[in-house]
Image (cartoon, grey):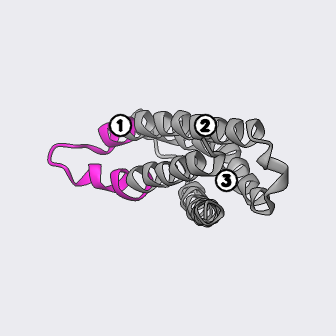
Amino acid sequence: MNAFRINSALIFLWIGFVCAISFMEAWLKFQAPGISLGLGLGIGKLVFGMLDKIEWLFAVIILFYLIQSKQIITHKSNFILLVPFLILAVQSFWLLPSLNLRADLIIEGKNPPASSLHFYYVGLEIVKIVCLAYLGVRYLKALK
């Protein structure tokens, strides 16, 4: 099976997961009756931790198919794949741990200082989605 066919499907699934969690679940859970800030943050830590693992799974499978098909070098659009991979690394190893630490402090009843970490995370999510969408469309065009 063509790597571009598989990877375009995986890329659009990846986009769907990120959009559903980062742009819907993240703020919507706080609208539910009875959800306190601490409970919402605890849910968010759990959900975003799982999203992070799923994103790495998508990234590894996409990379695997590109390497296996030897199309990682031959298709000029693949360089754009580095951007979501780098963003995912920044989110996994810096932003999520930092946001989890802030959430833990709030859950414990402490008041951490103001932070722009959420804005960085959202901004990177937008860049990641744009790059993935561009690459997904390029892969679909390569099928023709």
In this rendering, position of residue 100 left or right of residue 36: right
Q: Is residue 69 above or below residue 142?
A: above
Q: For the residues carrying marks 1 and 2, which lies nearer the camera in this image? A: 2
Q: Name which of mark 2 and mark 3 comes first in the sequence.
A: 2
On the image, the x and y values in percent for residue 52 come to 54, 38
- Residue at far left of view: 33
Residue 56's mark?
A: 2
For disc 3, the neighbor class at 10 Å (few under 14, some 14 to 19, many from 20) is many
Badge 2 crowding class, 10 Å Cα cut-off, few under 14, some 14 to 19, many 20 or more, is some
Whichever of callouts 1 and 3 sits on the residue coming sooner in the sequence is 1
Residue type at the position of mark 3: Pro
Percent coordinates x, y for residue 92 in the rendering: 63, 39
Which badge, 1 or 2, is on the more N-terminal residue?
A: 1
Secondary element at image label 1: helix
How many discs mark residues in the rendered view? 3
Residue under the point 70% across and 35% down: 64
Dot 1 surroundings within 10 Å: few (below 14), some, or many (20 or more)?
A: some
Image coordinates for residue 50, horizontal then vertical, percent:
47, 33
The residue positioned 32% from the left and 45% from the top of the image is 37
Return the residue at label 3: 84
Above or below 131: residue 50: above
| Residue 93 can be seen in this image | no
- According to the image, label 1 marks what residue? 43
Tell whether label 2 touches label 1 (CB within 8 Å).
no
Q: What x and y, as percent, mark residue 66? A: 72, 43
Quadrant where the C terminus sits is bottom right
Q: Magenta stretch: residue 132 in it? A: no
Point out the stretch of residues depicted in magenta: 22-42
